[in-house]
Amino acid sequence: MDKILVLDFGGQYSQLIARRVRELRVYSELIPYDTPIEQIKERKPCGLIFSGSPSSLVKNKNNKAPLISTEIFNLNVPILGICYGMQMIAYLLGGKITASGNNEFGRTNVNLDLKSTLFNGLRQNEICWMSHKDSVSVLPKNFKVIASTPSLPIAGFENDKGDIFGIQFHPEVIHTPSGMEILKNFLFKICGCLPTWTMVSIIESQVEIIRNQVKDGNIICALSGGVDSTVAAVLVNKAVGKKLTCIFVDHGLLRYGEEEQVIKTFKKNFKINLVYINAKERFLLKLKDIVDPEQKRKIIGNEFIRVFEEQAKKIKHVEYLVQGTLYSDVIESGTRDAAKIKSHHNVAGLPKDMQIKLIEPLRQLFKDEVRKIGIELGLPEEIVRRQPFPGPGLAIRIIGDVTEERLEILKKADKIVIDEIKRAGLYEKIWQSFAILPIIKSVGVMGDERTYAYPIVIRAVSSEDAMTADWVKLPYEVLERMSNRIINEVQGVNRVVYDISSKPPSTIEWE
Ligand code: XMP
């Protein structure tokens, strides 16, 4: 399988580059910039892409800017440097970088040299998207300029051999309309890749990897009923068959009727061993009086693993736990080069002394890619189209402490939100819709009496991959029905508000 490795220097769009390459049907993975050159070579990539970075090679007093060893150029694999990636190529090969003076952010007109294979089929003038402070001011030896803008004489370069390229703008963002054409030229005309990577090939390669990894022994899978863990379970089942047992842990933080629903759907559609564990009490006990969101997430992640370890002992000879972890869970939980936003229970919420080893076949992918695999695997629509629900469940939608009483309020309100979204035919059109229970109370008047009760927050967002999200402009009638029903049907609530914030700067969940 042809493979493009994207070296991550900490740029905002690193993961987007890998994803765009996969959209062009070439397998791609994001790897840390300081992965040993030997390991990169062993993986036999047909091309390398260097990402952007928040670092500067101009203001690099303490040598903190990430650099790759110049040995990378001896691999004779085509390279495309984007933004910082381009500057670093110039820096390493004897060119010069300067602070541009004018920071360039946003749409820019770029003048392209159409003789360069990288720009085959494009127009001489294209719109591109820039986001940089530094730029290349002197080319390395044996390089020529292939792109420029009115304020940036070197917006792109290429070496004489035609296998090292740099562009200062970002082809991976939608604001560079011809960006995909540039990536296509790099993949197909320069690296010689073939567009053969499909959801079928990822299924086949994952099945093979898992088979080779596991050999003897049994495996358990953390099943939540959502698309990620179900796809992971079906993939592993394809690889190891009856050796797999799925464990569905009910932590008491599920939505109204969810336990029965998950078991029913799973049993109806799959012939995979399933064990249901009622762990409501132990989770709620551990969460008692805990108000800090990060603490909640860690307690839940920890407790999940403890339950899985106990089950592993019962089943015997279990070495591996399968999780449906996605790339967005990994990046948000913080990597060495990316800041921590929140500890996803299945990544940064894991205990340090965990005994069981993990298998995470979806760790490099985004949810919409996993949905496509789900369709390929023949999963039913009701699972593939299910809105995401976080592993820590309602605990991170109840601000403040999680009590039975507050859980009950949120479950009822949440059910109304989902019912009304479905009734309006919107469930599959939006990414997520749900209710949140804040810690505050406010004054109201019901039946001539004063009330002092909780508000419910409604949140509905659209998104492609959970990395960014927009609040949905729900019709007023839908909001009105939700509000009336929640206030009338849910005791302890006297007010309903709608969250009109996007991500960033907010996040989808409140905690
Ligand atoms: P945020 O709130 O970070 O959420 O914008 C992004 C997406 O991830 C889901 N989410 C989680 N999923 N474990 C999960 O399995 C977690 O700890 C977790 N935290 C957030 C969230 O529902 C949204 O789809």
Image (tube, rainbow, N blue to C red):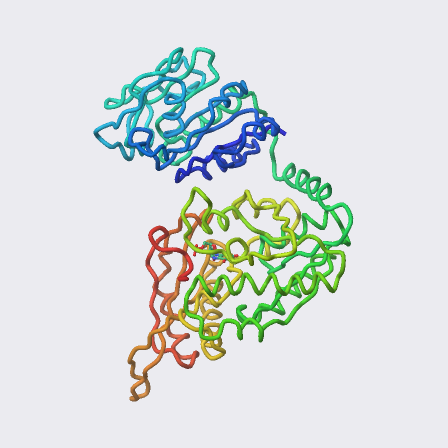
142 or 171, nearer to the observer:
142
Side (left or right) of 148 relative to 349: left
Q: Quadrant of residue 243?
A: bottom right
Which residue lies at the image location 65% right of the left edge and 62% below the top edge?
308
Using the image as rendered, state which of residue 376 and residue 355 is in the foreground: 355
Q: From the viewer's perspective, is 99 left or right of 49? A: left
Quadrant where the C terminus is found in the figure = bottom left
- Horizontal and vertical percent position of residue 467: 43, 48
Nearest the eye: 272 or 166: 166
* Number of marks drawn: 0
Q: Residue at 42% of width from left, 51% of height from top?
A: 340
User: Horizontal and vertical percent for residue 171?
Assistant: 40, 30
Would residue 373 be found to the left or right of residue 165 on screen?
right
Of residues 74 and 417, the one drawn nearer to the viewer in this rendering: 74
> In this rendering, is residue 396 above or below 445?
above
Question: Quarter of the image holding residue 461?
Answer: bottom left
Q: Find the residue positioned furthest to the front.
A: 62
- Residue 17 picture location, percent across and down: 46, 35
Q: Residue at x 29, y 35 (%)?
A: 106
Above or below, 324 relative to 64 = below
User: x, y percentage for residue 392?
Assistant: 51, 63
Image quadrant occupied by the N terminus: top right
